[in-house]
Image (spheres, rainbow, N blue to C red):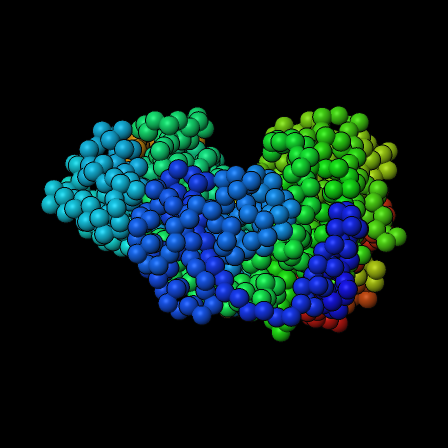
Amino acid sequence: LFSLEVAPSASFKMEGLMRRFASQGLGRLNKQLISHTAARASPMIHRNISVGILRENYDKWERRTPLSPNHVKELIENCGETLDNVYVQPASHRIFPDSQYEAMGATLREDLSDADILLGVKRVRREEDLIPNKTYMFFSHVIKGQPENMGLLQSILDKNIQLFDYEAIATDITDSTGKLKKQRLVAFGKYAGIAGMIDTFQCLGRRLLASGFSTSFLNCSQSYVYYDLKDAQRAVKAMGERISKDGLPMGLEPLVFAFTGTGNVTNGALEIFQLLPHKMITIEEAKNIKSKPGPHKCVYGVMVEQKDLVCKPGSTEPFNLKHYRENPSEYKSIFHSNVAPACNVLINGIYWDERYPRVLSKQDMTELYKDGHKNLFAVGDISCDVNGSVEFLEKTTTIDNPFFSWNPMTNKSTDEITSEGVAVMGVDILPTELSVESSKHFGDALLPLLKKMIVNRHHNDSDYQHLPAELSNSCIAQNGLLTPNFEYIRALMERTAKAVHHAIRDPHILLRIQGHLFDSGLINQILDVIEGLDCHFEVEECNVTPSISGAARVKSTLMIRVFSDDDDTLNNVLKKVTLLLDLIDSAEASMQHFDSRVQTSSDSKASTGKGKVSVLGEKEKNVLVLGAGMVASSLAEYLGRSKHTTVTVASQYENDAMAVAHNATRGKAVCFDASRPGDKLRYLIEEADIVVSLLPAPMHPIVAQECIALKTDLVTASYESDEMRSLRKSCEEAGITILNEVGLDPGMDHMSAMKIIDSVHERGGEITSFSSVCGGLPAPEAANNPLLYKFSWSPMGVIRASQNNAQFSRDGKVVKVDGSDLLASAEPFDAWKSLNLECLPNRDSLIYGDKYGISSAGTIFRGTLRYNGFSALFHVLKNMGLFEQEETGAASWNEVLENLSAKRGFEDLRSFIKYCSNGDKVLAARTNGALEWLHMKSDTPVSDPSSVVKSFCDVLEQHLQFAEGERDMVLMHHDIKASFCDGSAEHHKCQLQVFGDGKMTAMCKTVGYTAAIGTKLILDGDISNKGLLLPTSKSVYVPSLDLLSKEGLVFEEQVRHYKDLDEAV
């Protein structure tokens, strides 16, 4: 009998259902099987069906109805042969009066027990009002296991109710990126957007009034005040006419409305906005109109596209929407820097969940306020995700109290709209404010589906599986059981029954699991594990997508927080879920997790532990990555390829840590403030098999001391400092490996150079000349600005590096360059004939005589590459005083430049620039053009009046960033000459050229992969030497270069052989 109910290809479903049945008792199982068998054996009797329309009683404002009187009329006319009656529960608050339903042929009746199919909009208020053995259709809000509705669902099961949820009625469509996704068929469409826009006008009016501006927006009432949409539209048009005639108040800047999203919600909002006198403009145009004087007789609208909301750090490829949707954790939000400073009202209609960067975080808004950008007056968050895409939507609002004010400087909310914050509208039942149109729209979509259901029931077939797919997939419960697609909710129901309220700050782990969770049965087994360990959990996201025959397999996502006060229990959850992922290969699953636990003592238990977890007989390894900067993603991706390695990413910000951890098959994210390491650092290191520090170099000694104390290996990509070298003896005594300088430069330069140098030494030769240069540059097509440079790292770092002292040897003579003259010492470099390059000396080259064993070489030089002309122009800017820490002495850049000129005795800026260019007219003209291009010869305000150089760095960062689609480039070149005892000589040239791509920048590849490979070699025991190491030994560079070549990072080598040294010269 059981096999009749379950498809042979879905044995996991049978197994899951048997397990769930067993928990309910065999008696119930037998009873239901007998009942079902009897029903199938009964002769088929055709009977007419009755439909009932429920009175909405869940919220006093809910005036909508699933079918209007006209829909009832159409239903009766079209289904006369199969429809017995349409019953309507009387309701004086319904938007359509009862008399209209009667006029269309419906029967008013309080008791709906004669109806077979009962329709509502929202769930019933009281569970005891549910009528047993009926079919219900309404928004149940149980799909994510919402705790407040689990009691409702249990009553539905207990009363043998068949439940269809409008939210799940959907069809498969292919979006613009080619990805298969679900499109809801029954919804209230654009009316949330329409009502939300109207309400936001009122919200804006109150916020402007708080700032002393009386505007026509105050005269626009909330949507519910109007009987229907036509009334509301007339009121908005009248408001627009007053704006067009009288203009907005003097002193009020042009009002810019920014719209996010492209769906029905946003289209509805635009429909109302465009009733006002308006102009649709670009983001750049919005930035430029802010200085336009009033009074303004129109408003401005900006459509914010996905590429305006986020960017992939370090990427030079054009924005790829498909890649973003599939890999959202690789992106960061740029709305706060790109759009927010230019807009006054945000209308947010975008879909969001925890995988995606927020549109506006609290931190973003606080930074905007600190920078003086207080122009965002109001936010209409129509999407209404609490603490979601707009993080400071801290609560949903009601029609009674639709607005609140949030202050970014105090992080506090108040119901009073004040001038000290952002006014927020977050009503969560907006469509009911326009009940007439939203009900008509909803009924238009529902009616065709209802007709199909009536026909199905007429033929005495109530089995949901015989309905069209869009309906059958929306059936949550039947015959007292959850349907297979929604069986996962069972564990959520049982969780709720014994739930204790937990706050986000309580000890928990956040698991993000992606794979074929439903088809493999993995989701049920994960929930079994959590239940079995008696943990409370909360589902943040449950996107379960069963595979459809003939369609591409789509991976589902489960994001779940698991709470427990016992560390061992949470550790056990991780171990068992990890084991499940490894055992169930068909799931093709990966997992990342965030650990909220803040340990304050070395006695605390770990969430993973070094070497503690054994999966299928293989030892688990835990790599701790400190820092989540621009090169961390490639490191996590490389080390995280093995399902036996957990990559733990520690960063001050959860989102950054999760974004990097997402690159690993087994990724874990933890919050860690490197400025206050303390016991948390000790705890993290104690639980790691190896540590990779991507923190600023001054932090490395602190990390190293903890690693020595806990006998844990360490890898860094930074230069080995004197402070690090002072730890050599302690490191050796602890018996650990600390591998430094394993990145690009330093790192790959050491390895590739030492490969040549060691080869020469092993053959009895000696190095007579050594030159090594490296540079991170924009690709040629992206070097499209006066400085021929773009910043993939801190502009302040570049400025400081350009003032370092340098020394090197050339033809046996030591050359010393003072930091003040470094930029003037650049020389042409022609190793790449197609690139016009120059080279600057890089710090102290002479120390490499000992490091590389080449002290006898007449030339030892290390340099930094730039495009030709960069150094000369940068030198002029330095001479002008733009690298100084002194106060700006003015509020705008043109005044700053005039002050710098006057301070040095010049009456005009042009003469000053020529003087700083040492009389070079061409260079002076280039400098003048660069200052204009950087908008520094205008009234552009300085960002930090306390420091010229900090404000200048902000200008560089703003204008010299990589644009979407632009690539970076890494260049490295060695020129090495050698002589041998027999008088022969060799000339070696070795070079590397790497470009960024859509996945990662060239800098990310070369630094991250190199550090990851050094880490892996230590973990695997291929580097066994202890103490402080550099990648200059064969045991390090030989396997490292081999593994780098497998990632496409290959050096091109040329060598020329000469019979004698004279021939070589």
Q: Nearer the viewer, residue 839 or 948?
A: 948
Q: Residue at x 48, y 49 (%)?
A: 112
Point out the image quarter for the C terminus.
bottom right
Q: Nearer the viewer, residue 624 or 928?
A: 624
Q: Is residue 826 visible?
A: no
Point out the image quarter for the N terminus.
bottom right
Which residue is the extreme one toward the left? Answer: 245
Image x and y of residue 82, in percent: 47, 68
Q: Nearer the viewer, residue 853 or 255?
A: 255
Which residue is the extreme one toward the right? Answer: 617
Image x and y of residue 925, in percent: 31, 53
Quarter holding residue 693: top right
Quarter holding residue 200: top left
Quarter holding residue 246: top left
Q: Residue at x 78, y 58 (%)?
A: 15
Q: Residue at x 34, y 42 (%)?
A: 92
Q: Residue at x 83, y 63 (%)?
A: 763
